[in-house]
Image (cartoon, helix red, strand yellow):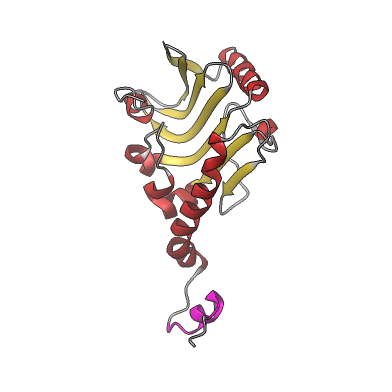
Amino acid sequence: MNSVLPVNKILTRLKTPLTNTQIMKTFLPSLLILLYCTAWPLCTVSAETSHTASLIFCASEDKPKVGFSFDHLANNKKVVRLFVSEEMISAAKEEILKSDRWAFTHVVDRLTSLLSMHTHSRSTTATIRGNYETILTMQEYDLLMHQRSNNVEIMVLGVRGKGRQLNELLIFRFRDEYCSRVVQLTGKFTVDDIARIIKLNEKQ
């Protein structure tokens, strides 16, 4: 019967040893997809009884510069949380950025970080709505869009850079009082990117 070699022994048999970056780009996309798909079903479970699904993919400890930090939700057991750094985005490309609510493929080459959070908890949704109200009062952020349709409310805020450039996009999506989603993007954007990111013209 054939035996399966550990990854480290396979790598030592290669004529040219792989660097850490090459290993990351070779194996990471499949690993990210597996982990993300494993955590995603928790979004459909009552978050009052679910466990934390917090996925963090970064190659360094440097945090992106943002106007508002959601670190206070990092250990919240009612939140499904995904953070991807610039290096991981480059490695995984659009494979990890697929979503039924958002579209990032057209800005993937301009992203420097992505934070996505989702909860079905009424108490946590109330906290996130409170965060939104706080952010509205902050000078760093401009309210770029506010849409309400039936029981869904979407708000988009941005931190302006040079000229028409936006250095950060912060998107809130609330449904009723129990479901909320937040996406925080850093990089280089324009207001023209917003409609495509939130799939404004698509039925959801």
Q: Is residue 200 left or right of residue 82?
A: left
Q: Is residue 73 visible?
A: yes
Q: Is residue 9 left or right of residue 160?
A: right
Q: Which region shows up in magenta?
A: 5-15
Q: Residue 130 at what x, y percent from top left?
A: 64, 16
Considering depth in this image, is 88 or 130 the residue closer to the camera? 130
Considering depth in this image, is 193 or 33 the residue closer to the camera? 33
Q: Is residue 31 left or right of residue 192?
A: right
Q: Quadrant of residue 162?
A: top left
Residue furthest out toward the bottom:
1
Q: Is residue 162 left or right of residue 175?
A: left
Name the residue located 70 percent from the left edge and 38 percent from the top edge: 75
Q: Which quarter of the image is occupied by the C terminus?
A: top left
Q: Residue 199 at what x, y percent from top left?
A: 34, 27
7 is within the stretch colored magenta: yes
Considering depth in this image, is 8 or 110 the residue closer to the camera? 8
Q: Is residue 64 visible?
A: no
Name the residue located 37 percent from the left edge and 35 percent from the top edge: 103
Q: Residue 84 at what x, y percent from top left?
A: 52, 45
62 is within the stretch colored magenta: no
Q: Quadrant of residue 178?
A: top right
Q: Residue 70 at what x, y percent from top left?
A: 63, 31
Q: Is residue 1 above or below residue 93?
A: below
Q: Is residue 6 above or below residue 114?
A: below
Name the residue located 50 percent from the left edge and 23 percent from the top edge: 172
